[in-house]
Amino acid sequence: KAMIGKLKFYKNKGYEHALEDLEGFEIIWVISYMHLNKGWNPKVKPPRGPRKKRGLFSTRSPHRPNPIALSALRIISVNPKELTITVEGLDLLDGTPILDVKPYIPYCDAFSNVKTGWLQELSSVDEVDYIS
């Protein structure tokens, strides 16, 4: 089940105004700083598919040379007065610094009929999940 959580913003920075008009969107992109990452490897074993090491940049591993993460999260609610966005699909640790929030806009964020590299070898993206 997808994790539900709240993104909290600092007071007295104008974020109450920045959060206005976001309620009408369904999905947001959240850019965050993976503050607890301690290094990276150029080859990693993804949690899905054959237990084979892959080039880091062909995976979604959180351990990267630059610890910036990108998450697509479903908006449950936006509360500018409380400076929060309640989201579903949260894949961040409590206290992870948020660098930016952008709305998902299908005409510029969705690309159909694109190649997905080694993932095309799997019968489905849920074929084998070594995390579960």
Image: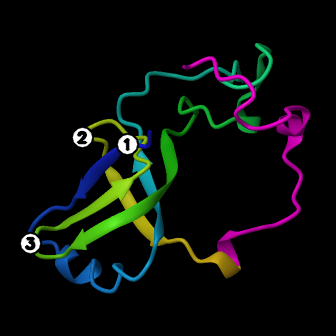
- Residue at left 54%, top 19%? 132
- Image side of residue 58 versus residue 15, left or right: right
Q: CA distance from mark 3 to mark 2?
A: 19 Å
Of mark 3 and mark 1, the one earlier in the sequence is 1
Residue at figure coordinates x 89%, y 52% from the top left: 115
What residue do we see at 80% from left, 17% from top?
50
- Label 3 secondary element: loop
Instruction: Work out how far the residue at label 3 is from the one at label 1, CA to CA, in angstroms.
Output: 29 Å
| Disc 1 from disc 2: Cα separation | 15 Å
Res 95 label: 2
**Pointer 2 local density, CA inside 10 Å: few below 14, some 14–19, many at least 20:** few
Which sits earlier in the primary sequence, circle 3 or circle 2?
3
The quadrant of the picture occupied by the N terminus is top left
Residue that protrudes farthest toward the top in the picture: 51
Mark number displayed over residue 12: 3
Instruction: Please tell me which residue lies in front, 3 or 20.
Output: 3
Q: Which residue is mark 1?
A: 3
Percent from the top left, x then y, of residue 11? 9, 66
The amino acid pointed to by label 3 is Asn
Span shown in magenta: 108-132
